[in-house]
Amino acid sequence: MKKSNQEEDKITFKNLRRLYFFALLTIAVTIIISQILVQYNLNQQLSDSKIINFSGKQRMLSQKIVKEVLILQYVSDNASAKQISHLNDVLSLWKKTKMHSKTAVTA
């Protein structure tokens, strides 16, 4: 009688060990999968933030262009070469940013 009781205890202990191992394995797999998903989402947000930064720079430059043109048209009686040169610099920077943002979005 004692032997059968001990054998049942061993079987129960083995079953519990298997269940415990299975539970730990399930937890580990779940953690790994969730970490993979988190890293994927972080990488997506990183690329989104680059696009948002390009858009913000584009908006800032377009506002600067409008401001410079309005200053040339309404404030200054005669446009100086320095003001026109500054406007051309801003325009060229705006064009470069626009081309760079197009390539960044398609990449």
Image (cartoon, helix red, strand yellow):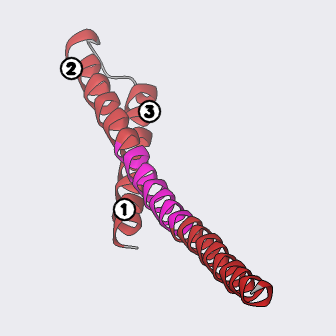
- Residue at 20%, 13% in the rendered image: 74
Q: Quadrant of residue 104?
A: bottom left
Q: Going by the image, does 36 lie left or right of 59?
A: right
Mark 1 vs mark 2, CA separation in Å: 28 Å
Q: Secondary structure at mark 2?
A: helix
Q: Secondary structure at mark 1?
A: helix
- Residue at 40%, 54% in the rendered image: 48
Confirm or deny contact between disc 1 and disc 3 (CB under 8 A): no
Foreground residue among 80 and 3 = 3
Relative height, residue 97 to residue 73 (above, below) = below
Residue 5 placement (x, y as % from top left): 72, 82
- First in sequence, mark 1 or 2: give its number: 2
Q: Is residue 35 magenta?
A: yes
Residue hosting label 1: 99
Region of the chain picked out in magenta, as a range: 34-55
- Residue at 26%, 10% in the rendered image: 75
Residue hosting label 3: 86
Residue 10 placement (x, y as % from top left): 75, 84
- First in sequence, mark 3 or 2: give its number: 2
Residue hosting label 2: 73
Task: Give the farthest residue toward the left.
Answer: 74
Relative height, residue 37 to residue 70 (above, below) = below
Q: Tag 2: Cα neighbours inside 10 Å, few (<14), some, or many (≥20)?
A: few
> What is the quadrant of the C terminus in the image?
bottom left
Foreground residue among 46 and 83 = 46
Foreground residue among 77 and 19 = 19
Viewer-side label of 1, 3: 1
Identify which amino acid the numbered label 1 is placed on.
Met
